[in-house]
Amino acid sequence: MHYAPLAAAEAFERSLGDPHDPARPFSFARGSALDAAEEFPEAACALLDSLRLHHHYVPERHGGRLTSYEDVLQLVRMVARRDLTVAVAHGKTFLGAVCAWVGADDAQARALGARILAGDAVAWGLTERDHGSDLMAGEVTAAFRPGDSDGDSDGGDGGGDGGDGGYRLSGEKWLINNATRGRLVAVLARTDPDPDAGGRAFDVLLADKDALPPGTYRTLPKVRTLGIRGADISGIAFDAAPLPASARMGAPGTGLATVLKGLQLTRTLCASLALGAGDHALRIAVRWAARRELYGRRLDQLPRARRVLADAYADQLAAEALAVVATRTLHTAPGELAALSAAVKYLLPVRAEASVAALGELLGARSLLSGPDAHAQGRFEKVRRDAGIVALFDGSTVVNLHAIVSQFPLLARAPGRGGAAGEPGAATDLTRPLPPFDPAGLDLVARRGCAALRALPAVADDVEALARRRPELADCAALVRRLAGTAAAVHARLAALPPASRTPSAEHFRTAEDWARCLHGAAAAGLWLASHPYATGEHAEDGLWSDGLWLRAVLRRLLGELGAPQPPDGADEDALLAHLWRQERDGALFSLFPCRLAEGARA
């Protein structure tokens, strides 16, 4: 099936060059060496700048090239599949700027867009050393001073009070990506000292470090991390740093709401990092299993190894299906993202980390070796460490599950409002164009739940109707129906739970996990139903799309995690592995869609 965002990403991938060529600025060898030295990937980021990847971080309406978040997902995925450190280091500008796209007025957003297009990097100052993800407890303050009658204004665009007054920013933000290297920092600060102001006590202010007077800020030392060792994870401290009134993005008191809405975009797009890590680890493992002999047979011929590879591949395809549907939902139903983005950010990094760990057991001791002389230049050990960091970005696993729990009353009612198989519309039908993203459609809660789950019973009906005409789809129909029944049971559990306190119970978290898995399966089923008629080429001919092979593999995995294990199907496993090996041999991305990689076919 032709999938336009991946076709565009394929051209971008070719421009990055063969990662196996050590002379390339974005090669595997260079990435491993920089990781060992804990050095920032300057050359790789410069290459991405030369290819204008940062132009895709800026919406078209503000001067950039971002028209579809699907494109951003797939472009960053190509970077992440080579090196997560580079993806995190370069992609930080999108995170830092997202509050402008969500909450700033057009003039502010366009001005920031121009700075990014000119090459300025933007950091996002959210977390603090003593408060972590508890943004409401933040102690960084920005005191407003009206006018400049006291005569201490020094003018300029980034410092001084100016005629409209300004802020004095004080306090420390810590564990901030590119806090040291970024010129601009979007800072969440407390602007109202009233303890009863609640969430309206905060604003997002854009600080230009180069425009601040000497002594009003200092960067904090780089923090040594287990993964993404070369990234600039550091901090910044302000001491009455003067900012103009125009530094505030959005109306007064909207900072926290703007951040929470911005996180819905960034959590969804974190899927690109999980997809990249999964592809990288699986490719190393597949190549190893094809060469390694054990007990007189190749490793990829042994039942246990085949199961590990098939499961990791199914998880990769499942992650892609959810990522595509969620990213398209940003355009089609942004009001659902409060729940959907939290599910994506919980599910995909955790699943990627688990897949990498399982593949590591397959490689044995080689998965733990680092350095240029280790297997695959120690890249597996690196991706294992890097993948573990992804779950911490933009809210940890617990934070995202808590976000789902807090919406239980709404999610419990959503299925009862009915739904039709066609309700998700353009989110699952890949042939339908997407409307422009409208940030005004974002909401702090998913008032109608998620369309994929609302439509699941109707999707099950439609797949069963197809199976009556095409018997080869009988197993697919049975799995979708089983998922619909399981989802109904999970919603019944959810509705029966008492409202969660500030500290939800273990049962609240278990139910949130199961709700997210049901959503994952529903998104996959909806995507297959809406888009499989348009599948052509090898993906259709071998049954990956036409006979529902990938959907069966995904639903078996998810139903097993939901406590409804399905018997294994040896024929499906063989067919799935055949597709995996063909993609690896042909130098293609591990994907539901055709996409050639720069290294090309294996010799």
Image: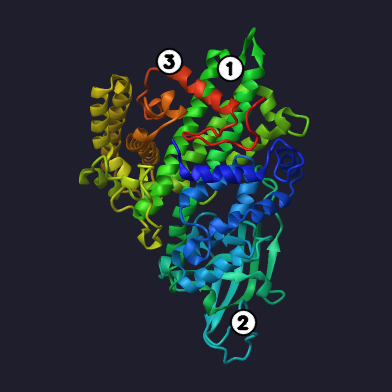
- Residue 68: give its label: none
First along the sequence among labels 3 and 1: 1
Amino acid type of disc 1? Asp
Under circle 1, the secondary element is helix
Residue 417 higher or lower than 187, as above or below: above
Amino acid type of disc 2? Gly
Q: Looking at the rendering, which quadrant does residue 54 occupy?
A: bottom right
The residue located at (41%, 31%) in the rendering is: 536
Quick one: 247 or 316, which is closer to the camera?
A: 316
Q: Residues within 10 Å of mark 3 (few under 14, many from 20)?
A: few
Picture coordinates of residue 106, whole percent (x, y): 46, 71
Q: Is residue 16 left or right of residue 423?
A: right
Q: Is residue 323 something that shows in the picture?
A: yes
Amino acid type of disc 3? Ala
- Kindly indicate whether the residue at mark 1 contacts the one at mark 3 (C-beta within 8 angstroms): no
Query: Depth-wise, is mark 2 or mark 1 nearer the camera?
Result: 1
First along the sequence among labels 2 and 1: 2
First along the sequence among labels 3 and 2: 2
Q: What is the C-alpha distance between the residues marked 3 and 1? A: 16 Å
The residue located at (60%, 34%) in the rendering is: 280
**To which residue does mark 3 refer?**
571
**To which residue does mark 1 refer?**
300
Residue 310 higher or lower than 594, as above or below: above
Picture coordinates of residue 318, whole percent (x, y): 44, 34
Q: Is residue 391 something that shows in the picture?
A: no
Query: Depth-wise, is mark 3 or mark 2 nearer the camera?
Result: 3
**To which residue does mark 2 refer?**
160
